[in-house]
Image (tube, rainbow, N blue to C red):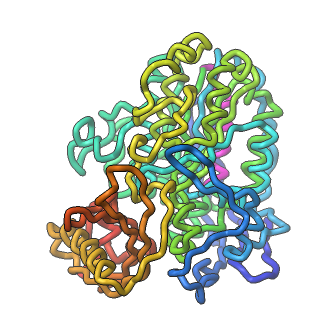
């Protein structure tokens, strides 16, 4: 049992108390779990971090003093040199000093007996964490990434709104809108026919695993049909689904944080460790944490020690000597008061990514590794992660001679570029197929909220939302209640001579939804540059709509 206490200055307050019983037994590929239910539960006392911003003027641009920029000919990605100082005014964080929510015995697991051929490939994800918020809330893990000489992608830009489009690009190399023509013809279809990257690894002789620490909010299951069969050799969904139903405690933001006395994210990390201990074959694994990070800006700090210790054990056991790890997120915080600031706007678009390579890989595939380090400060996307994974299936394509040959080919305008090849310095969001709405490269200047143009752009956005909802009469017709902010994107290039783009934030009624959209105007007409983002929580307002995307917009009558 342990308690986390927060001290002044004021900020979000956490109190965790873990009790109750649950035993999970792993034996080879068989999983047996015994659940003992009790009246004892885990309690969370918290205050929403939105209270921190009660008096914030969301129309005011936030420009931190200690900033720098990734300079390329085509794109400039802003980033912070000193994260802690640059955000102290904006996010009054207070790290807990006594973090012992659940004490557990060391398992003494040893990876040294594995005789795999090189290399295991793992994707370890933490949902909804920007690069800067990772450094703020998980500083110990960030420091250990540096100790491990992990390559951090400073210019990694998301390509869609939420988890689904960004991870579909990683796992399939496609936009989610392209799935209709390949494997997902309608909203009632299952994902079994989609050619996910793990199938290529499986055909190459790898064992495969897919695990998320939440079943109802998983990327394939939230208002979607999921899989009929088992997509991978090891599939954690059934266990998590039953654990949530029978032993889930402390529900927060639609997710159970604990399985009785144990955090779900810890169960996920233990599962990764169990697979690494048990399997004698090469492993491709996709493991994604959702419960702690999805809806709260500061909750990832609770995971800092656990992830640090996880990587320390993996390193000390020797497992990292035969494993490549993509440690990453899908996007930053997408809603809440922080998201409505200029800082939040950027962080939403710039998730964290670290790539860890064994020393033997760096030596043998030194040209590929050198290129990846070069690309750490260039514009990169989830599509590039997919192409990089393809190169890791057999490793033939990343031998030095092959990399040298491929580097001389014409690929600069390709959407999907392996990070083992030099990404062009002059790459732009347009060539990377990032909609202007998601592009962090563009500078912005404030515009009047009172202008005719501002009102027209807001009305166009709301009209677009109503058009999307027209087949759902149970949704109320939305109206513009307030134009909250308008900024103009600074665009360069001959194609923008007679073209302007505005980023508009509008509050609608009924329901009070806050939406952000990028709209363009040319030849007297408005058009949308990407999807429309929702910036505040919608709770159960859209319970009457089955479509996952339209739930962002609908207000049920």
Q: Residue 294 in the image: x percent, y percent? A: 54, 61
Quadrant for the C terminus in the image: bottom left
> Is 103 placed above or below 391 here?
below
Q: Nearer the viewer, residue 80 or 389?
A: 80
Q: Nearer the viewer, residue 193 or 60?
A: 60
> Image check: 101 left or right of 196?
right
Magenta span contains residue 203? no
Query: Which residue corresponds to the image point at 36% horizontal and 36% vertical from the top-left?
Result: 229
Q: Nearer the viewer, residue 352 or 283?
A: 352
Q: Quadrant of residue 317?
A: top right
Query: Which residue corresponds to the image point at 57% horizontal and 50% vertical from the top-left?
Result: 329
Q: Residue 166 in the image: x percent, y percent? A: 44, 48
Q: Is residue 548 visible?
A: no
Query: Which residue corresponds to the image point at 77% horizontal and 36% vertical from the top-left?
Result: 149
> Is 3 placed above or below 137 here?
below
> Image check: 384 left or right of 398?
left
- Residue stretch in magenta: 264-281
Q: Residue 22 in the image: x percent, y percent? A: 65, 55
Q: Is residue 265 visible?
A: yes
Q: Quadrant of residue 413?
A: top left
> Is 290 placed above or below 154 here?
below
């Amino acid at each position: 049992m342990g308690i986390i206490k927060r001290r002044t200055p004021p900020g979000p307050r956490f109190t965790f108390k873990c009790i109750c019983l649950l035993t999970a037994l792993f034996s080879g590929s068989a999983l047996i779990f015994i659940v003992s239910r009790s009246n004892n539960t885990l309690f969370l006392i918290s205050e929403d971090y939105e209270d921190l911003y009660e008096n914030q003027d969301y129309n005011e641009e936030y420009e931190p003093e200690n900033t720098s920029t990734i300079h390329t000919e085509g794109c400039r990605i802003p980033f912070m040199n000193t994260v802690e100082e640059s955000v102290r005014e904006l996010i009054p964080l207070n790290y807990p000093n006594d973090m012992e929510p659940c004490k557990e015995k060391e398992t003494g697991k040893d990876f040294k007996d594995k005789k795999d051929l090189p290399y295991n490939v793992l994707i370890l994800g933490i949902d909804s964490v920007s690069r800067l918020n990772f450094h703020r809330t998980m500083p110990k893990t960030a420091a250990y990434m540096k100790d491990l000489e992990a390559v951090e992608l400073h210019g990694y830009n998301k390509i869609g709104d939420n988890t689904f489009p960004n991870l579909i690009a990683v796992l399939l190399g496609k936009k989610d809108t392209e799935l209709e023509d390949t494997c997902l013809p309608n909203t009632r279809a299952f994902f079994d026919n989609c050619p996910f990257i793990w199938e290529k690894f499986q055909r190459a002789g790898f064992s495969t695993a897919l695990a998320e620490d939440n079943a109802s909010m998983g990327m394939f299951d939230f208002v979607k049909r999921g899989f009929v069969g088992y997509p991978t050799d090891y599939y954690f969904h059934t266990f998590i689904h039953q654990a949530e139903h029978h032993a889930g405690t402390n529900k927060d933001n639609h997710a159970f944080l604990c399985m009785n006395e144990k955090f779900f994210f810890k169960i996920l990390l233990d599962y990764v460790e169990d697979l690494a201990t048990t399997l004698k074959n090469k492993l491709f694994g996709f493991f994604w944490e959702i419960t702690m990070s999805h809806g709260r800006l500061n909750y990832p700090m609770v995971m800092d020690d656990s992830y640090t210790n996880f990587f320390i054990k993996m390193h000390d056991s020797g497992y990292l000597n035969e494993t490549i790890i993509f440690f990453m997120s899908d996007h930053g915080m997408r809603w809440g008061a922080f998201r409505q600031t200029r800082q939040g706007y950027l962080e939403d678009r710039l998730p964290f990514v670290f790539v860890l390579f064994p020393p033997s890989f760096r030596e043998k595939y030194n040209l590929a590794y050198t290129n990846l380090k070069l690309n750490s400060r260039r514009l990169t996307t989830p599509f590039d992660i997919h192409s990089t994974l393809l190169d890791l299936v057999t490793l033939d394509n990343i031998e030095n001679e092959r990399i040298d040959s491929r580097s001389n080919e014409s690929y600069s305008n390709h959407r999907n570029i392996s990070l083992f090849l030099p990404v062009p310095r002059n790459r732009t969001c347009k060539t990377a197929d990032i909609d202007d709405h998601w592009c962090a490269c563009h500078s912005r200047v404030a515009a009047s909220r009172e202008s005719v143009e501002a009102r027209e752009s807001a009305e166009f956005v709301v009209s677009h939302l109503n058009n999307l909802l027209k087949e759902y009469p149970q949704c109320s017709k939305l109206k513009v209640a307030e134009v909250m902010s308008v900024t103009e994107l600074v665009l360069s290039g001959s194609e923008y001579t007679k073209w302007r783009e505005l980023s508009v934030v509008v509050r609608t009624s009924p329901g009070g939804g806050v939406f952000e959209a990028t709209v363009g105007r040319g030849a007297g007409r408005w058009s949308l540059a990407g999807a429309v983002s929702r910036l505040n929580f919608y709770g159960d307002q859209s319970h009457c709509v089955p479509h996952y995307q339209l739930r962002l917009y609908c207000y049920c009558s």
